[in-house]
Amino acid sequence: MNNHFVQPPENTYLEGPPRQVPGYHSLHRMTAILLAEQVPADGSLLVLGAGGGLEIKALAEAQSGWSFEGVDPSAGMLELAAETVSSYRDRVRFHQGYIEDAPQGPFDGAVCLLTFHFIPRESRLETLKQIHQRLKPKAPLIIAHHSFPQTEPERTLWISRHLAFGNSQSANPEVAKEAMKTKLSILAPDEEEALLKQAGFSGISLFYAGFSFKGWVAYAG
């Protein structure tokens, strides 16, 4: 499956998301709350796009009994994640690769934050199906990433808003805008929900919206 991520620079990752994503730490807290509605105290979680380790650290702090299988294609990002979650390493295992390289589970829940906009459109549905087949029935999936209308002028407007919020230091804002348009795979919210349904998820609900970012909770059928 061709779903190669376009990864951010490893040495800046821990600084970037908190600055660029509205309510970043609250997003982690909401994710923990939504997962805890279904995931047992000793539950196992699949984390796709686990490089950096920030979401695993937040979830491990929220629930002392959860264990995690983190997957990411970047060896450098996984090394960074291992450092980030060093206090919880007995509950975390990392796997270099993509969703097809993840353990089969079945898992009590899955998380994929700030990752899907790096996955090409043609690989989105298969990625969601691969996650679904690794989940127990009714297990929750939490996803959050860039999602906004892809028609103009809305598309350019939302990109401009994102860059303004993140206080982009780019010397040429137009170059930064073009990079988002060409290097990221961004879908409109209705397309995101349609793909979740096609992959077998139900009970799909939007729980987070922060400028250009959207987050959904959905449940395995």
Image: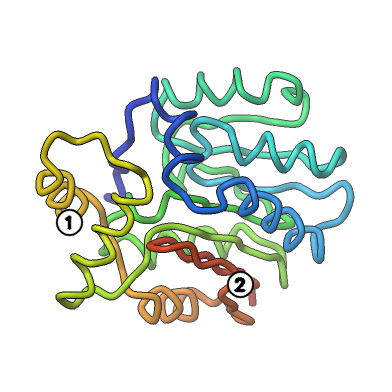
Q: Which residue is mark 1?
A: 181
Judge from the rendering whether residue 221 lies leftward or rightward of residue 32; answer left or right.
left
Judge from the rendering whether residue 89 lies leftward or rightward of residue 169; answer left or right.
right
Rendered location of residue 32, percent (x, y): 73, 53
For the residues labelled 2 and 1, the Cα–Cα distance comes to 27 Å
Rendered location of residue 83, percent (x, y): 60, 18
- Please say if 64 is above or below 214: above
Query: Which residue does the image show at 36% across and 78% down from the upper left?
Result: 191
**Front residue of this view, candidates 20 and 80:** 20
Q: Residues within 10 Å of mark 1 (few under 14, many from 20)?
A: some
Secondary structure under tag 1 reads: helix
Judge from the rendering whether residue 43 lies leftward or rightward of residue 111; answer left or right.
right
Q: Based on the displayed image, in which of its 4 quarters is residue 148 positioned?
A: bottom left
Judge from the rendering whether residue 74 lies leftward or rightward of residue 88; answer left or right.
left
- Please say if 136 is above or below 88: below
Of marks 2 and 1, which one's residue comes earlier in the chain? 1
* Amino acid type of the residue tagged 1 in the rendering: Lys
- Please say if 56 is above or below 208: above
Rendered location of residue 106, percent (x, y): 69, 55
Checking the image for residue 218, the label placed there is: 2
Rendered location of residue 95, percent (x, y): 53, 32
Q: Quadrant of the C terminus?
A: bottom right
Secondary structure under tag 2 reads: strand
**Front residue of this view, candidates 214 and 195:** 214
Query: Which residue does the image show at 29% across and 44% down from the upper left?
Result: 4
